[in-house]
Amino acid sequence: MEVADRGEVQLQDLTVVTDTKGRSVAPPPVGDVDEPVVCFDPGRVLADRDGCAALTELVGRLRTIGYDGSPYASENDATRADVSARTLIALARREPTTRHDVVGALGVDAVSALIRCGALALVDEDVLLTAKVFPMRSLYTLLPGTPPGQDTVYLGPDSLVLFEIVWAARGFGDHAADLATGNGFLAAALATRYDHVVAADLSSRCVSTAGLVPVVNPHLRTRFAAVQLDVAEGLRPGSFDLVTANPPWVPETIAPKGDQPRRFAAGGPTGFELPRRFIDAAAELLAPGGKAFIACMDIAFDNGHRPLAEHLPRLAAHGVGATVVETRLNQTFDYDPRAARKAPRAASARHVVVELRRPS
Ligand SMILES: C[S@@+](CC[C@H](N)C(=O)[O-])C[C@H]1O[C@@H](n2cnc3c(N)ncnc32)[C@H](O)[C@@H]1O
């Protein structure tokens, strides 16, 4: 099977999402609106107090309705009879929606504020939300598109696979850090189990998007901070109960066709140069008894070189245990040909999560 890499596997492929009844959920239709009339600028929205208040209201209403991203979301008895609910669900699904109905649902001030900060685009008589709303039970995060020349705020199947593994470990505690956080959805989930969560990313576009997590989930406000960091620079070593990261792990340094480097994907020539920095940083951040989960690729080269396997014993020398778990993505995607195309002499590639443990 042809493997989609990170540039190709975007939200459109999140077939693993299920609604509250366990039904498989297709992603919201994006139709021809992938490049919206106005691009969602998370920094601009974050700086706009009225825009943030309107977003809080919009997502709060979606939460009250129980919007779960499902295509059946507007089909239950309650929403079928409720014009406002159907309007808000259509907005969240990025369907062009009559301006009149949206004003009816949210009020004229909120709609004006959303238009002013660029969170809503005007398309003739309709309005269109310029970012996707990504629901995860009672948590909601935002996913902006990628305007030309700007960093991608990434969310893909590998993001969800890491989430599943972290969630299944059932940890809780005081301090957690999600490094390379992207839109902050995993950090948002962690904030329901950890009292203080740092969501860190190098991309200012990602940091601003993650900064909107407490705007659309006000109950997390005191537990969640988004910060711009290179890997984990500046975070206090030995003080985190949990560290997670889905760093860039595609073997590449510059983008195909000479475009800008794909910051969300490019892990270095072997795909392990950047993940190695995250693994080492995570090991340093762990408090006694703490755990870390880092997603990456385990690539083997035809000369026997295997960057991940060769690196892990160095962690043991620093008192940190490591286990490598292959993820279910390998059942869907054959990573071998993709790795071979991207990294000369790559013989095999498996998507894995590295679990680190610092003894108590
Ligand atoms: C594959 S995306 C993962 C995003 C999110 N964690 C997820 O799983 O959906 C990788 C992220 O790493 C960030 N990144 C790239 N280089 C980084 C660095 N040196 N330090 C911190 N973050 C970095 C990118 O901006 C991007 O958001």
Image (cartoon, rainbow, N blue to C red):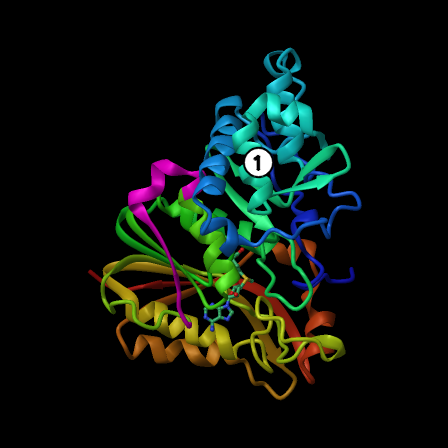
Between 295 and 87, the one lying in front of the other is 87
Q: How many marks?
A: 1
In the image, is residue 225 part of the stretch drawn in magenta? yes
Say which quarter of the image contains residue 270: bottom right
Q: Which amino acid is tagged 1?
A: Ser
Q: Is residue 192 visible?
A: no
- Percent of width and height locating residue 277: 43, 76
The residue range painted magenta reads: 215-230
Image-based side of 230 in relation to 342, left or right: left
Q: State which quarter of the image contains the C terminus.
A: bottom left
In the image, is residue 280 part of the stretch drawn in magenta? no
Q: State which quarter of the image contains the N terminus.
A: bottom right
Q: Is residue 177 visible?
A: yes
- Percent of width and height locating residue 179: 42, 62
Image-based side of 224 in relation to 31, left or right: left
User: Which residue was labeled with disc 1?
Assistant: 112
Mark 1 nearby-residue class (10 Å; few <14, some 14–19, many ≥20): some
In the image as oriented, which residue stretches furthest toward the bottom?
A: 303
Q: Is residue 257 above or below residue 160?
A: below
Residue in the picture at 65% in, 63% down: 6
Residue in the picture at 40% in, 44% down: 214
